[in-house]
Amino acid sequence: MSKEFCPNCGKSVPQGAKFCEGCGHQLQAIKSDGSKPQQQPPYQQQPPAYQQQTPAYQQQGQYPPPQHQQGGFMNRFQKPPDYVVPPNYVETTTMTQRIIGTTKMNVHVVEEIERRPDLQSEAQNLLIISLAIITLFEIIAILSLPEEYEVFSTVGTIAETIFVNFLGEFVLIYLLARIGKAIGGAETNTSTSEMIRMLSYAYVIRAIAQAINVMGRTNDSVGLSVVGSLAFFYSLIVFIFVIRRGLDKGYLITIFTIIVSVFIWIIFLGIGGIVLAEIFDDTYRIIPNNPN
């Protein structure tokens, strides 16, 4: 006479019983060979079927692999997968590509600069060079255009120009990054260093505009002066665009960030101007336009 055993605990159970008296396991009328109880519970017989479900589950696309891993970006920079690289986007390989992309207000290039910490050194060099160009051409304009500027102290003029156009512009960028982070709130994922990195590329067109404008003024070239002025206004548009992309907010928050930053920046320049006035007395002044 064959015996039946509980597949869960192995205890002998009456034939036809629906539940094991020892452990309460529901019986499914599993018969043994009469020599020993079946020790393998039913769930141990299911792994093959479960393993077959796993590939099918992945094939349904519910957990697709991140796109940036296949492009090698994840392996190079170890950036957490908190962004999605556009399928047809090819990452930039040169500084020129990144400058042109930022100047053209290419969203993908600007966001690539934001997420690539390996560009930090390149961005810092760009910012220093851009600010140096802006400062140098401003000094050239002040010292070369006596009809526009009256210089009282050459050394003081150079010191004030460096303070306003080099240190002052850098402070403005820092204020935009910090205040933008504060106003943007928790939803703004861009860090201060990332914002400064993005704005560094935007400052290249600003430096080019400054150089063209000063060359036009010093050479009495109306054409160059007009081109320089247009380039300057375009650089402001690029600047606002980059700030907005960095904040991940609308233009209203962007403009508000700029207004608050510029207000604090003006206070900073005013304090610095008072200190320079104590050191150099008078530096230079802008000659008002002669209506005659």
Image: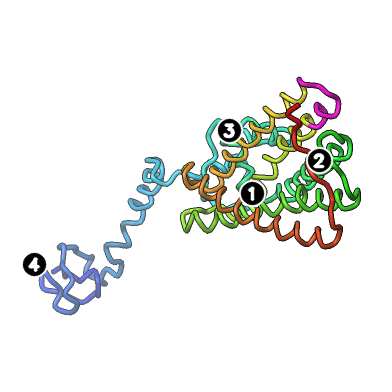
**Amino acid marked by disc 3:** Tyr
Do labels 3 and 4 touch, CB within 8 Å? no
- Which of marks 1 and 3 precedes in the sequence? 1
Name of the residue lying farthest toward the bottom: 22
Residue at label 3? 89
- Gap between marks 3 and 1 measured at Cα: 18 Å
Disc 1 crowd, CA 10 A, few/some/many (<14, 14-19, 20+): few
Question: Which label number is shown at residue 251?
Answer: none
- Left or right? Give the position of 37 relative to 95: left
Nearer to us of marks 3 and 4 is: 3
- Label 4 sits on residue: 16
Q: Is residue 37 magenta?
A: no
Mark nearest the camera among 3 and 2 is 2
157 to the left or right of 261: right
In space, the residues marked 1 and 4 are separated at their CA atoms by: 61 Å
Please name whichever residue, 290 or 108, is drawn nearer the observer in this view of the structure.
290
| Residue positioned 37% across, 47% down in the render | 52
Would residue 188 be found to the left or right of residue 212 on screen?
left
Q: CA distance from mark 1 to mark 2?
A: 44 Å
Q: Position of residue 82 (x, y in %)?
A: 51, 50
**Judging from the image, what secondary structure is the residue with disc 4 in?**
loop
Residue at figure coordinates x 23%, y 65% from the top left: 33
Q: Work out whether mark 2 precedes mark 4 in sequence or the reverse, and give the earlier one.
A: 4
Label 3 Cα crowd, 10 Å radius (few <14 / some 14-19 / many 20+): few
Nearer the camera: disc 1 or disc 4: 1
Magenta stretch: give its range: 214-223
| Category of crowding for the residue at label 2, using alpha-carbon neighbours closer than 10 angstroms: few (below 14), some (14–19), many (at least 20) | many
Question: How many other residues sit within 10 Å of disc 4, few (<14), some (14-19) or many (≥20)?
Answer: few
Identify which residue, 30 or 59, lies in the foreground.
Answer: 59
**Horizontal and vertical percent position of residue 147:** 84, 33
Which residue in the structure is indicated by mark 1? 75
